Structure formats: C-alpha cells, structure tokens
Amino acid sequence: MIGPDFLHVTPLSLPEVSVPTGTAAAITGTATRASTGILIQAPASNTADVYIGAAGVTASTGVILIPGGSISIELADASKVYAISGSANQKLRVLVV
C-alpha cells in the first residue's frame, strides 16, 4: 500500500549552467554517469535559442532548444552532450537520471 508520504511532492529546483557563445562545451563539464539519460531544459527567461549536440555542435548542426523548451536524451554519460548559443547569458537546467 502506498502511504501518505508517497503523495507528498517536493518541488525540484535545478541549478542553472551557463551556455558558452564561442565554442561548444559539455553541459556537465566532467564525466557524469546517467542510469537512463538526461533531461535538459532552457529556462523561459532565456532570450535566445540554445543548440544541443555532440562535441563541436554549432547553430547549424545542433538541435534547437527554444526558451522554455526541453529535451530528454537516453545516454550513459551526460558529459557527451554539448551546448552553444549565439547570444551571451543563456542558461540550461540539467537533470541526470
């Protein structure tokens, strides 16, 4: 039987990471083991698109993540995902699961 504690949900607050503008960078910085994958969200407060992909991703080759958008990716190492933006001060929230 599921008890009342199961029904209590605590809001999840994810730290924001800065997205580079000149050269793409790994979104986690170091090897980060994921059991099933990652969820990446661009905060609605972003003012420009962010591009997600493998090392060397560009605005021409990446998956577009608009402000407020999110994407989930199945993979074992979150550090294999890179991001870049054409505009400074863009952020991402990353949940490794």
Image (spheres, helix red, strand yellow):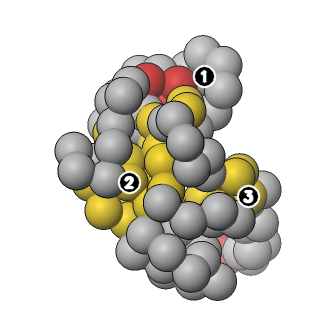
Above or below 82: residue 40: below
Residue marked by disc 3: 16
Q: Is residue 1 above or below residue 47?
A: above
Question: Is the residue under label 3 in contact with that under label 1 (CB below 8 Å)?
Answer: no
What's the residue at 30%, 62% (across, down)?
64
Alpha-carbon span between mark 2 and mark 1: 20 Å
Which is more toward the observer, 88 or 79? 88
Q: CA distance from mark 2 to mark 3?
A: 16 Å
Tell me how far mark 1 sits from mark 3, CA to CA.
16 Å
Q: Is residue 90 above or below residue 62?
A: below
Residue at numbered disc 2: 51
Left or right of 10 in this view: 28: left
Q: Residues within 10 Å of mark 1 (few under 14, many from 20)?
A: some
Q: Secondary structure at mark 1?
A: loop
Task: Please tell me whether mark 2 or mark 1 is closer to you in this view.
Answer: 2
Q: Residues within 10 Å of mark 2 (few under 14, many from 20)?
A: many
Amino acid type of disc 3? Glu
Quadrant of the rendered image containing residue 29: top right
What SS does tag 2 mark?
strand
Per the image, label 3 sits on a secondary structure element best described as: strand
User: Measured from the top left, where is residue 97 in percent x and y?
Assistant: 53, 40
Apparent side of residue 15 relative to residue 67 in the rendered image (left or right):
right
**Which residue in the structure is indicated by mark 1?**
32
